[in-house]
Image (cartoon, helix red, strand yellow):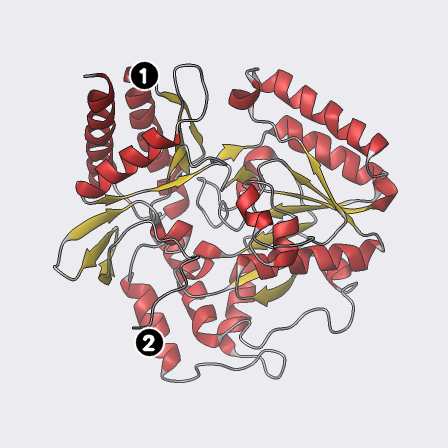
């Protein structure tokens, strides 16, 4: 009997037969409250009627017009609508299929533009699983070890401001990380060798840790001083997820390249990078392309996604419902010392489980996720040891759904700590 690769470990045993809004349904018709949204992909919920209608209409007229050969209407409309959401000088796009492809395209563009090789990333980064993207990823040794051999060179790793991990306040953490960055530039890689600084405004796989305005200001200053390009990886945190359209907007920073994917097309494979035309023109001939890139149906779904975000006020909804979710998670944490930290932005929230001495506690996080699944709510863990539970529901989530999620969360956490300490 055919099976999936055993290397693909699934978080649940569910066989989903359909999805609607915040819910997935299994073969028995049981409804599960989905707080994963496909890891941030189904941004407008499962099978939003406007997305379904746009995709159906496009399938009937043109499924794929290879964009290295022809342009098509959904692509042109997407560039116009997406361009209105970009920083004012970003008017050129390259489209691909996955986040890892887009990340690698951004790095290649930076190298082409600067003539330099090295890329500076941060502890806890996740930029993809392909060989090139894995070299840029530091959120878990498993992503790097899976290469079974040397990864591409030219990657320099600097500390990311994670106050809870360091045990300092944010200001002290920012100062330390920027000092360490200067030390790295003096000892590991001269600034003249660095093509780009690549950063997630809110780290994803590492546990939903936001950066800060002060840290970004320090990065922008150093980038400008040394002719380094600043790339924001908005694959998970972008497209309204954090309560602003782009997560970097929280930090008053101007990136040179923005990378996007996941929620941009409500479940259809689409990714890309944006930059100003002058910078994009420095891409080497043949360095950008892809057979399935900018698929017409995916582009039509992306256009519909942007329309739904605007029409339904989903940026504001992410901010407001995210705060409601955060408040509830903090109330739970206040009752359980095993939840050491709650953090995130908008509808991108995480709870970090720790032992009595502050060490990661993956047994607790996995037990809580399992307890929630028994109550028909789907959650995911993250973090280097799987000790962090993340919540990344669809942007359409409402007050009742937030409250239901928190009710299940409280019951699940209480069950686990009751079993442990009762």
Q: Secondary structure at mark 2?
A: helix
Assign the N terminus to one quadrant of the image: bottom left
Whether residue 361 sits left or right of residue 414 in the image: it is right
Sort mark 2 into few (<14), some (14-19) or many (20+) by Cα contacts within 10 Å.
some
Closer to us: 269 or 339: 339
Closer to us: 296 or 141: 141
Q: Which numbered tag is attached to residue 334?
A: 1
Residue drawn at x 65%, y 23% as measured from the top left: 174
Q: Compared with residue 197, is residue 293 higher up or lower down, i.e. above or below? A: below
Closer to us: 68 or 71: 68
User: Residue 32's spot in the image, x, y percent?
Assistant: 20, 49
Question: Which quadrant holds residue 340?
Answer: top left
**Circles 2 and 1: CB distance less than 8 Å?**
no
Q: Which residue is mark 2?
A: 56
User: Residue 176's spot in the image, x, y percent?
Assistant: 69, 20
> In the rendered image, is residue 399 in sight?
no
User: Residue 62's spot in the image, x, y percent?
Assistant: 44, 83
Residue drawn at x 39%, y 15% as measured from the top left: 356
Whether residue 366 sits left or right of residue 254 in the image: it is left
Q: Secondary structure at mark 1?
A: helix
User: Residue 70's spot in the image, x, y percent?
Assistant: 59, 83
Question: Which quadrant holds residue 293?
Answer: bottom right
Sort mark 1 into few (<14), some (14-19) or many (20+) by Cα contacts within 10 Å.
few
Q: Compared with residue 67, is residue 381 higher up or lower down, i.e. above or below? A: above
């Amino acid at each position: 009997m055919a099976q999936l690769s055993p290397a693909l470990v699934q978080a649940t045993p569910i066989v989903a037969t359909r999805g609607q809004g915040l819910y997935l349904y299994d073969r028995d018709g049981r409804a599960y409250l989905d707080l994963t949204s496909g890891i941030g992909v189904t941004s407008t919920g499962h099978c939003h009627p406007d997305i379904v209608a746009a995709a159906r209409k496009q399938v009937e007229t043109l499924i794929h017009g290879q964009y290295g050969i022809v342009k098509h209407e959904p692509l042109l409309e997407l560039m116009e609508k997406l361009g209105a959401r970009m920083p004012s000088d970003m008017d050129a796009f390259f489209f691909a299929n996955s986040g890892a492809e887009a990340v690698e395209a951004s790095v290649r563009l930076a190298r082409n533009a600067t003539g330099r090789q090295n890329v500076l990333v941060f502890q806890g980064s996740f930029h993809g699983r392909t060989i090139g993207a894995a070299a840029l990823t530091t959120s878990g040794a498993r992503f790097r070890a899976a290469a079974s051999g040397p990864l591409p060179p030219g990657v320099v790793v600097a500390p990311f401001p994670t106050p809870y991990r360091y045990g300092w306040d944010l200001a002290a953490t920012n100062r330390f990380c920027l000092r360490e960055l200067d030390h790295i530039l003096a000892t590991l890689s001269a600034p003249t060798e660095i093509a780009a600084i690549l950063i997630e405004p809110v780290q994803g796989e590492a546990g939903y840790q936001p950066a800060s305005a002060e840290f970004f200001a320090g990065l922008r200053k150093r980038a400008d001083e040394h002719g380094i390009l600043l790339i924001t990886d908005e694959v998970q945190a972008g497209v309204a997820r954090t309560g602003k359209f782009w997560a970097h907007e929280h930090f008053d920073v101007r990136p040179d390249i923005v990378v996007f994917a996941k929620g941009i097309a409500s479940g259809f494979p689409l990714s890309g990078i944006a930059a100003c035309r002058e910078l994009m023109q420095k891409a080497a001939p043949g360095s950008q392309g892809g057979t399935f890139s900018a698929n017409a149906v995916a582009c039509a779904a992306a256009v519909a996604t942007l329309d739904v975000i605007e029409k339904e006020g989903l940026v504001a909804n992410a901010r407001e419902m995210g705060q409601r979710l955060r408040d509830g998670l903090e109330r739970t944490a206040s009752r359980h010392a095993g939840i050491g930290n709650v953090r995130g932005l908008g509808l991108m929230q995480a709870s970090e489980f720790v032992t009595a001495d502050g060490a990661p506690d993956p047994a607790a996080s996995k037990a809580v996720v399992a307890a929630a699944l028994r109550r028909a709510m789907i959650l995911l863990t993250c973090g280097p040891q799987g000790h962090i539970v993340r919540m990344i529901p669809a942007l359409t989530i409402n007050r009742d759904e937030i409250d239901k999620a928190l009710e299940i969360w409280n019951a699940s956490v209480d069950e686990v700590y009751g079993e442990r300490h009762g």
